[in-house]
């Protein structure tokens, strides 16, 4: 393999760069525009407003948006949004919100337990080992995947938001997350030392359970302890009052929601990997013995086809994406050509989707909900998106996304298995390929 020696930048290099800059006739104009307005404002394509027209041939009625505020709970919000829309349709009620705090509490406890299991399983490895370093880096974090939220619902059920409302610490998770991360890393030192000193399996198990109990106490202090039962109360669209007392969260989910989460699959488009394969990301699973994080990796037209079919049948769609790319939060725009930065600077910024995954440019940074699509001759050109950033972003919290933004920056959707072909459903029976903990789909 060839190797080049480092080359020092010289005065001659800088003179050449200066000459090239001053030979550009538009250099002064571009410089004034960028310095005065900033890169994005100077690069904004005014035609984006035309492309992002807010009318859709398929549009579901979904009501007011939720607000995750200063937290990384989008994956949880998006799943609960899809569930509450089902409840609103079947029970003929508007703006019925489910408790995000309830699932968040259990995720913190369950995920701590899983963290300790990983630390014990890798206790023979150096802390700088890439796998161990990954677990330590993720300690205390808020982010997650659809199967993680589904696993929580399957084990713990759901409840209305009023039964376990948000607290300051669920709206602003930074201080709690930092404290929990420090505690988990402190515990990791203790567990690894116990293993090295020959502690028995029973001693390790007792210590792990004690540590999980301390996390439970931290969560209870910060979020409140989840109620065992609640009273379901709501008024439907016909103004009829409904009440059912002493429901458990699991009974509420089983009785009142027409949804078997085992019937849904995460369909991904990660072209850095072979398509038409099943993958598993065990490193992020949050419940021991719970739902596995699995992805069916397909071509992008297949992913979009399944999402469109579910929308046409009146059901919203959870989707994972890189919201930090080509996005205007204020206007609620998602457009792959929104900021024409390459043209602004006269440089080439092109990477295809596979290259972005391979070179750490692609990342699943957010989850939102598809609530509509505009079809022209059967093909989509823009999508309606329900976000969880409150009503002050976009149009009362709703964003609009061009189809090319979806092509480039949407990496996964969650759809019912009935929208897959027989061949695709058969792939779901295969033994999944294990992904590295740090895979970009994390």
Image (cartoon, rainbow, N blue to C red):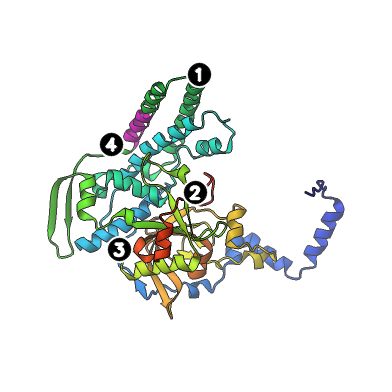
Q: In terms of depth relative to the viewer, which is nearer, 141 or 12?
A: 141
Contact flag, marks 4 and 2 (Cβ < 8 Å): no
Q: Residue furthest right?
A: 12
Give me the C-alpha separation between circle 2 and circle 3. 30 Å
Structural distance between the alpha carbons of marks 4 and 2: 29 Å
| Disc 3 element | loop
Residue 166 visible here: no
- Mark 3 — residue? 63
Mark 4 and mark 1: Cα distance apart in space? 36 Å
Query: Mark 1 Cα within 10 Å, few/some/many (few <14, many 20+)?
Result: few
Residue lying furthest bottom: 377
Q: Which mark is residue 370?
A: none
User: Is 264 or 330 nearer to us in this picture?
Assistant: 264
- Per the rendering, the mark at residue 197 is 1
Give the distance between the C-alpha atoms of the residues marked 2 and 1, in whole angstroms. 34 Å
Q: Does the magenta portion include 218?
A: yes
Q: Is residue 390 above or below residue 217?
A: below
For marks 4 and 3 on the same chain, the one whose residue lies earlier in the sequence? 3
The kind of secondary structure element at disc 4 is loop
The circle on residue 442 is 2
Whether 36 is among the magenta residues is no
Residue beneath label 4, please?
A: 225
Judging depth in this view, the residue of 418 and 349 nearest the camera is: 418
């Amino acid at each position: 393999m060839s190797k080049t020696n480092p080359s020092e930048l010289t005065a001659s290099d800088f003179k050449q760069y200066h000459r090239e800059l001053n030979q550009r006739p538009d250099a002064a104009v571009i410089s004034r525009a960028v310095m005065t307005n900033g890169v994005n404002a100077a690069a904004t394509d005014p035609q984006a407003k035309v492309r992002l027209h807010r009318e859709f041939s398929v549009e579901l009625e979904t009501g007011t948006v939720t607000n995750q505020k200063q937290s990384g709970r989008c994956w949880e919000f998006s799943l609960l949004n899809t569930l509450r829309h089902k409840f609103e349709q079947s029970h003929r009620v508007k703006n019925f919100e489910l408790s995000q705090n309830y699932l968040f509490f259990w995720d913190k406890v369950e995920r701590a337990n899983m963290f300790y299991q990983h630390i014990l399983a890798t206790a023979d490895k150096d802390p700088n080992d890439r796998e161990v370093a990954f677990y330590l880096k993720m300690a205390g974090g808020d982010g997650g995947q659809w199967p993680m939220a589904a696993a929580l619902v399957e084990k713990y059920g759901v409840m209305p938001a009023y039964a376990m409302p948000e607290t300051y610490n669920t709206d602003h998770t930074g201080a709690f997350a930092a404290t929990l991360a420090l505690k988990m890393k402190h515990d990791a030192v203790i567990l690894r030392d116990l293993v090295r000193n020959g502690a028995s399996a029973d001693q390790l198990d007792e210590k792990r359970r004690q540590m999980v109990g301390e996390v439970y106490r931290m969560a209870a202090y910060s979020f409140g302890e989840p109620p065992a039962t609640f009273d379901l109360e709501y008024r439907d669209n016909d103004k009829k009052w409904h009440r059912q007392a002493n429901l458990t969260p699991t009974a509420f989910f089983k009785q009142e929601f027409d949804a078997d989460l085992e019937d849904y699959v995460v369909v991904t488009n990660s072209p850095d990997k072979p398509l038409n394969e099943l993958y598993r990301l065990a490193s992020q699973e949050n419940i021991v013995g719970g739902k596995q994080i699995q992805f069916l990796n397909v071509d992008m037209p297949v992913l979009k086809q399944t999402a469109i079919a579910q929308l046409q049948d009146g059901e919203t769609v959870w989707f994972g994406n890189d919201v930090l790319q080509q996005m205007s939060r204020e206007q609620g725009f998602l457009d792959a050509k929104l900021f024409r930065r390459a043209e602004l600077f006269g440089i080439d910024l092109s990477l295809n989707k596979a290259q972005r995954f391979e070179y750490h440019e692609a990342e699943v940074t957010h989850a939102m909900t598809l609530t509509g699509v505009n079809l022209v001759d059967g093909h989509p050109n823009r999508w309606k998106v329900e976000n969880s950033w409150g009503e002050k972003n976009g149009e009362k919290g709703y964003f609009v996304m061009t189809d090319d933004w979806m092509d480039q920056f949407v990496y996964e959707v969650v759809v019912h298995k009935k929208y897959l072909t027989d061949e695709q459903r058969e792939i779901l029976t295969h033994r999944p390929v294990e992904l590295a903990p740090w895979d970009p789909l994390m």
